[in-house]
Amino acid sequence: MDCEYNTSVLKTGEGCDTRNGKPTSGRKRRRRRESKKERKKDEGRGSRNAQHAVDSGERTEKERQRKRRKDREEKAEHVQSLDKSKVNSRDFAAKNKKNLKNEKTRSKGRSKRELEEGEAKQPQRKGCAKAEENEQDTCERAGKRKGKKKKHRKKVETSSEQESSEDGDKEGEGEDEEVEEEEEEVEKEVRPETLTPEELEKLKEAVDDKKKLIQALRGKPWPMKKKHSTLRESQEFLEKYEGALGKGKGRKLYAYKVMMNKKWMKFKRDFENFTTACIPWEMKIKEIESHFGSSVASYFIFLRWMYGINMILFGLTFGLVMVPEALMGRPYGSMPRKTVPRAEETNAMDFAVLWDFGGYAQYSVLFYGYYNSQRAIGWLKFRMPLSYFLVGVGTVAYSYMVVIRKMARNANETGGGDENSFNFSWKTFTSWDYLIGNPETADNKFASITTSFKEAILEEQESRKDDNIHLTRFLRVLANFLVLCCLAGSGYLIYFVVRRSQKFALEGFENHTWWERNEVNMVMSLLGMFCPMLFDVISALENYHPRVALQWQLGRIFALFLGNLYTFIIALMDEINLKRKEEDVVQFNMTMWEASLHNNTADNSTAPPLFTHPADVPRGPCWETMVGQEFVRLIISDTMTTYITLLIGDFLRAVLVRFLNYCWCWDLEAGFPSYSEFDVSGNVLGLIFNQGMIWMGAFYAPCLPALNVLRLHVSMYLQCWAVMCCNVPQERVFKASGSNNFYMAMLLVILFLSTLPAIYTIVTIPPSFDCGPFSGKARMFDVIQETLESDFPAWISKVFSYAANPGLVLPFMLLMVLAIYYLQSTSKSYKEANVELKKKLQMQNEENKKKNKRAALKAAMELEEARKAPSSRTAEQHYNPSHQHRRHDMADSRAGSFSSDQGKNGDDQAPFTDCRRSKPVKASASSRGRHANQGATAGYPAGHPRQSEPSRLQRVASTQRR
Amino acid sequence: MGNKQTIFSAQQLDAYQSYVPFQRLFSRYRDLAPQLVPLDYTHQPDVKLPYELIGSMPELKDNPFRQRIAEVFSEDGEGNMTLDDFLDMFSVLSEMAPRDLKAYYAFKIYDFNNDDFICKLDLVKTLNKLTRNELTEDEVRMVCEKVMDEADMDNDGRLSLEDFQHVIVRAPEFLRYRHTPQ
């Protein structure tokens, strides 16, 4: 009987369901059962009906006991599954409710129930519904930690069955046997053809649940043994029923699926390991990070990222432009654009010329001018000009995509202002890297953790500091004024130099010295070197927080570099115009020259045309190659300055400081020159501008990405070495959290600004007539038109021409603008809502804190009252200890299979129960009062949840009241 | 390893293998003390490796919390480990372990006095272990205060498991365990 009751409790949900929600299924099942098990049912009904009539009086008493037992079990489980204490209490409430509900339904539909009882309690059904039970559970708590719950339920059930048999209730035992019998029957019964569709469905669900349990098993904080037993159980279950579901083939399919799943998991894991192992320089950067803090490391991470991008750009230009031309295009010397002209032939191999990317370097695949305008080359019929154009566009498009995606991801990662709310906690709990297995790394990690704590503490103190605001304001204005002066001065200097160099160019470079020829580049490099230092000195006036100061510094240097770059571009434009004038002259001369050739051969037209060596043919100046050369030279000089600054400014300085310190009159290491710090802002900006130049020049010099990859590779090693050997960590190490997107934003601006001139030249200036893949066309983008007309069916070009119609383009652009506006406004509103919600959350948190405080106070008051209460309560207290004690014992006995943590919990519980037990011994009200007082005011002894005490009291009281 | 054939019952193997790369871990376990660990595990011998051996593994030996880890995962609470404990430890510390599980065990690791709450004393211990006592007392006190301020939702002066999980699942570093080449 006991057992029966318990299972019925467990099944209330289901019962309700069949009665209210799905009557048909119940009926069907009944029908089937009737047909199958007529005899047994009759027996069962008779006996059970009689029981009900007899038992109705006893029920209330039994129920109470059962409830108590349940309560106890709950407790035991509560103890066992410490981590889920909250859920458990919810569970507890739910169970109580269910009991109540059960009672209600009982009293209401007694007669109906009695009718059904025979069937509802039909052992056969119980057996076959074993699976259903599980699934019903999960239905009730859809989504609420299914596997775990099920486990609990099962345990409750089994334990109750055990108890009932312990009680010596004959019927209970009989029932148990019956259950076993039925289970066997079920096993026989599970054939797909004998199951109704609903049951099949339910079985399927149960099987799915088991699968989920198996999958989730890894996530349970249980010891191995328990996991194993659970796993075995569910696997057996699966094996038994899965085959039934799949109608014979299911077993094989299942095994196959499992195997594939395992293989797939393994592959994924290996692949992940592989990709993480492929991340280059990870160790180096980690090392630097541990010594110099995250801001310096952020530069190197940025550098690595740039390296990745450049690798892809390099792959594109190398694979689709340079290699096809070198392999399949016409060879060197076959035509004028591919030959060094006669005048330059003598010193085309000189190092000085090659270093300047003249001579043989100029007439090679490295530059635009070498490429032939032949539409298709080689046996592959590779469309060279088209490929050249598309790669040029593709590199820019790819860069845009990557930068914007990275920005978006960074923005997502920061998550909008939440990052500081748990700053210290995260540092404390998550900063150790559990994968460190190397003493040196561990040392570094200790160092870096200490640094990060110091940073955080510093920041915290910084935010509290409040200085003389007028003075700082004045100083900041002054600093900005000085910086503006610097910028204006450098702008003027560049303008002056460019004008001068134009004058020299008109006069011809040959008459001037090396310095005069390279004045522009050198001045730009020098300005780029010294101005940031000046800004650095000036920014000391401002007294910003280092992170803010870094951003200001970055902004200023950005402005400086931008000015430099644009003056350079303007100068270049002038030069292009000059070259184009020259080109016109050459073109005119060419026609004259050809005419003269014709005149010579006109005498005997039958003779073969006179062969002129391609080196002798007059040619135009090819401004595109000139632009490419300029950029390449700029990159080279920039790289050189960077490296030389590094060697002199950092290495030499460090060496001098280190060794001259022995024989110097003041302490060099601590005093004036000291060791240099790593200049994050300058280096980042150098990298960004370098990249900008690559983007600008890559169209005219396909070798630029390759050069840049080389440069980045070298500078990675060089700078890593320089940082580790001759720099000292910044005095105020700080976090670089937000500045990452700042770099990205600057990179995006530079990308935009550098594609502008490139696109301008491509669209507006006609290509040279005798060099490059687009020679002979009016504009470079005509290559698209040409391809559309000759390689695609006619309708596509028609569609294109329609699509290019301004009547279509303008509305489309308007639509885009509208879409952007709409998206922007929605994102704004989302942001606002986000802020609002965050505020609410914070309010709620504070409220909760207050409430908890109040609850604690209230509990104290209640304890106070309990002290004053009449001594009748002592009886209750007398009861409680035994109650508690029993509960505790249960927990202990149950904890047998669960190892350490349960045992520990039992221990934790022990002092509590002990003190409760000791109370009746003390007996006197005053002593108890003292006890309560202590608990309320002087704080609880460690290990006792403060909140749980009053609630436990209440709970105990409530059980008493029943 | 040809002649060193390990013996497990098929059932054991089946059960173990679904969690962890079992053979590898068992050989790791056995290599720690070949004289103690038998090759035949069919009868489930009662073997425990002492903490000194566990703590000297390369995975743990540089970890400031190695003792705590061993204590938390061992059945006797003193760091002496059976094979099951050992497997438990590795399955939790592996990257594949789910977030909640990691959080649960992390909580236990940081709970030095096993009272199921992280109190200030636990925090101080954690900090000192993390920084090798390089922070001054004032700094430690301040950090502890800040942590409590941030994470303690119910204001009882210590962190419960819920508080801890609330904090930790939001941490960006929490799931970003990367392989460091050794």
Image (tube, coloured by chain):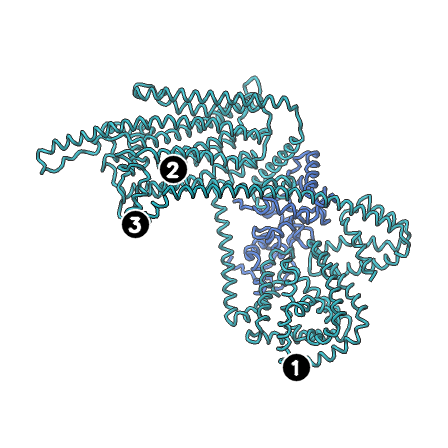
Identify the amino acid type marked 1: Glu
Q: Mark 1 points at which residue?
A: A38
Whether residue A607 is situated above or below residue B93 in the rendered picture: above
Instruction: Give the residue at the far bottom of this rendering.
Output: A39
The colour with which the image depicts chain A is cyan
The quarter of the rendered structure image containing the C terminus of chain A is: bottom right
Viewer-nearest residue: A144 or A611: A144
Same subunit: marks 2 and 3: yes
Disc 1 versus disc 2: distance between alpha carbons?
87 Å
Determine whether, in the image, residue A316 is placed left or right of residue B160.
left
What residue is rendered at 19% in x and 33% in y? A613
Disc 1 versus disc 3: distance between alpha carbons?
81 Å
Identify the amino acid type marked 3: Ala
Instruction: Tell which circle, 2 or 3, labels the residue nearer the N-terminal end.
Output: 2
Identify the amino acid type marked 2: Ala
Tell me where residue A292 appears, x and y as whole percent. Answer: 56, 33
Q: Element under label 3?
A: helix
Nearer the observer: mark 1 or 3; the answer is: 3
